[in-house]
Amino acid sequence: MKLAVLLKTVCATGALLAASSAFARVVIVEPTAPPPPPRVEVVPGPRAGYVWDAGHWRWDHGGYVWMPGHWQPVHVGYRWIPGHWVARGPNWHWVPGHWA
């Protein structure tokens, strides 16, 4: 929907050709293999007012890169949903951690 609004705006300004060539250069490469097993982390803590966001594998330039865990400030009335990888068709997608 945002792309449709952007294209409508771009068409109105007469800059469609420049915008479409910019969009044509965007290439998204998604992993087709699952991430490696998570690394074992020693969690420092507990830490009052924070929840541990465990480390995870991030897809970067054609390979998985480990991102270490860190503390997230607690949002009162919410619970932390950890980020995780999900298979969708032949590709793997990262679902970021979030508060629910």
Image (spheres, rainbow, N blue to C red):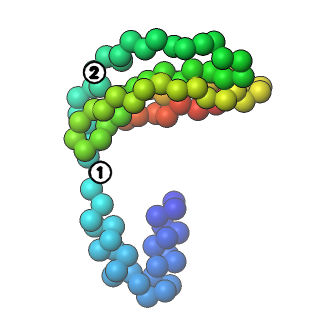
Q: From the viewer's perspective, is 10 left or right of 93? A: right
Tag 1: amino acid: Ile
Question: Where residue 54 sits: x, y (%)?
Answer: 48, 21
Residue of label 2: 36
Q: Secondary structure at mark 2?
A: loop
Name the image quarter holding the C terminus.
Answer: top right
**Label 1, residues with CA under 10 Å away: few <14, some 14-19, many ≥20:** few
40 or 15, which lies in front? 40
Q: Is residue 45 above or below residue 94?
A: above
Quick check: 48 left or right of 5?
A: right
Rendering coords of residue 42 (x, y %):
46, 11
Farthest-out residue, right = 77
Residue located beneath label 1 in the image: 28
Residue visible at 28% across and 32% down in the picture: 64
Name which residue type carries label 2.
Answer: Pro
Q: Residue drawn 28% across and 67% down?
A: 24
**Residue 3 shown left or right of residue 18 in the figure:** right
Residue positioned 31% across, 37% down in the render: 59
Q: Nearer the viewer, mark 1 or mark 2?
A: 2
Q: How far, Cα to Cα, is label 1 from label 2? A: 21 Å
Rendered view: 34 above or below 18: above
**Structural crowding at the residue carrying mark 2, measured as other residues with C-alpha within 10 Å and reported as few (<14), some (14–19) or many (≥20):** few
Asked if one can make out residue 38 in the rendered structure from this viewpoint, the answer is yes
